[in-house]
Image: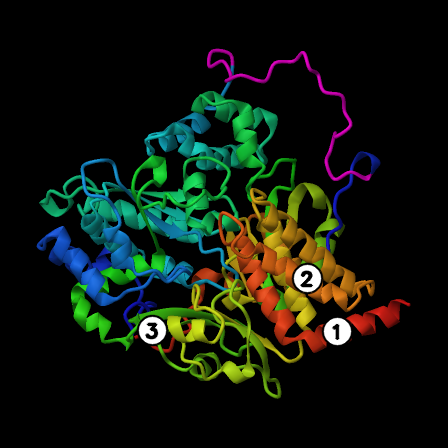
Amino acid sequence: VKLLLNGIDEPGLSTLEGYERRGGYRSLRKALGMTPEAVLEQLKTSGLRGRGGAGFAMGTKVSFLPKGSMDKYLVCNADESEPGTFKDRELMQKTPHSLIEGIAIASYAAGTGRAYIYIRGEYVLQADILDAALREARAAGYVGEHVLGSEHSVSLVVHRGAGAYICGEETGLLDSLEGKRGNPRLKPPFPAIQGLYQGPTLINNVETLSTVPSIIALGGEEYAKLGVETSTGTKVVSVSGHVRRPGNYEIELGVPSREIIYGLAGGPAEGRKVKCWFPGGSSSPVLKEEDLDVPYDFNSMAQAGSMLGSGAVIVVDDSTPIMKVALKTAKLYRHESCGKCTPCREGTNWTVKMLERIDAGEATPMDLDIMASVQEHIIGNCLCVLGDAMAMPIGSMIAKFRDEFEAHMEERRLSHA
Amino acid sequence: MTAVRRFEHGSRVPGWDAAVDLEKDPAVIPDAATTEVPQELRAEIEGHLALYPDRHSAALPALAAAQRLHGWCSPEALEQVACVMRVTPAYLESVATFYDMLETSPVGRHSVYVCTNISCSLCGADELLEAMQSAADAAPDGAAEFNVRGFECLGACDIAPMASVDGVYVGPLSVDDVPQLLDDARAGRPVLPAKQLARRPCADPEAGA
């Protein structure tokens, strides 16, 4: 079953006319005919879990927002900066109205009067398309004052970022949206209680919100029949790296990972084998070839010692030294650490330095243990999980490819001697 | 790998040993009567200010607008934005220094971001960046024309290795594409039209239904 990518290349789908021709905005009409509580109930029954990385149940998140007449906000996280992830890009570019409709419905269920789409600054084309779609939707009365003549009003603004990985972290995003440096905030209070401009704020990923219209159309119960019990529905996975057909594929959660990497994306080139793969962006601990039969869903990935994350599968074949993967990963986090918390700022920096020491032939086997312990001291000790996002994959690489690191170290040491 | 920029005595921080003028007061919000702001820039920033309950939220779009006009977030650009937004230039500088797309020193006219993150580097991005850099350096007026830099994941791993040229995504690129790419960017033509992401169909077999 394809809910998001089905016919997404249809010409004109990004315009209001094309979207309405396919039955667009019918879910919004249906939702407005229900009470907000009934819409929320549908979202809860659907079992939809957030598609941005954390996998938190969306319906539950909505219900955390306090009742009352204070200013409440909905923020769509379109920062999509997790390496390997490019699903939101394709969704926004080709079917922007799905997102706008999803925001209109979610804001009705959550009672939020102001909504923002925070899109990364690099996505120029996608932001322009969203702006154009938003103008059409506004003119047609799908967003703005009294949506389709109802009591519900929601203003929507597309806000462009300026290039910072950390602004995909929800509280960093809020600070950035408030016009500051994108430094994460201490939690609690969680954004649902105190978020944007100190008001209760619902933050959801593009794919999550784009799925909402399908849930309302199908009914929560029908949607929950897709996928597996703890991971319902479909998911767009971005497959990249050493595969023959990289790209976005929509799968039902729970399919074997092998089916995604080999069946859909074609696997590594002739004669090459999978050495390791990231199941959910570069922040997820790497898995090896023997894990290819793990079902691709939230809980199975967690049981296998990794995570589904943003649904970005990065495949590395056996021609690539693990050192290169580790160094690339660590350098990203060093560059993107906002510098607010010491374990992350220093930990990412020292991890890169130690990896470079290995390459320079100056490392001793003890360095691997020190490096592993640096990772352990980052996890759980910072305001946000950026540091953890380096510590988990690097820790897993050291644990799973220790022999290769040691061999590389020895080889470098001898060649520099 | 790009070398770290070094300043006085090998420090990474420019001007670290320059004496501070302790008598000097910090810059205040620029005087609206004496600060000249180009009309279009003022109109654009005011348009952004109207979208948010708190004027500070307009900082990123306003700085981006000023950068388009001035080429980078120069002291003059910050002064103009600060004047319209009614904030101090220091506040804007604190914002501008945080974000990769806001330039805090003068750069070449055309931005060429080469993604060097995992998926792209598995597909040869490091060689691509090197080729791009040396081709830009060798080109006439290279430094004034091109701002070639490695960038963290640009979110287009399906077209790896790729680059964003003045905001337009192109890929998969090979080293052979570099001269054409730079020529197109310099001439203001559409960059490598056949390789633009905008034209790429979705990989999912049912996307074209």
Q: Residue A71, position in %: x, y?
A: 25, 36
Q: Secondary structure at mark 3?
A: loop
The N terminus of chain A lies in quadrant:
bottom left
Considering only vertical position in the picture, is B180 above or below A135?
Answer: below
Q: CA distance from mark 2 to mark 1?
A: 13 Å
Residue A91 vs residue B75: left or right?
left
Give the residue pinned by disc 3: B208
- Please name the amino acid that badge 1 sits on: Glu
The colour scheme used to paint the residues is rainbow
Q: Residues within 10 Å of mark 1 (few under 14, many from 20)?
A: some
Q: Residues within 10 Å of mark 3 (few under 14, many from 20)?
A: some
Q: Residue A302, position in %: x, y?
A: 44, 71
Q: CA distance from mark 1 to mark 3?
A: 48 Å
Q: Residues within 10 Å of mark 2 (few under 14, many from 20)?
A: many
Give the residue pinned by disc 1: A406
Q: Residue furthest bottom?
A: A271
**What span is colored magenta in the figure?**
B10-34
The chain letter under disc 2 is: A
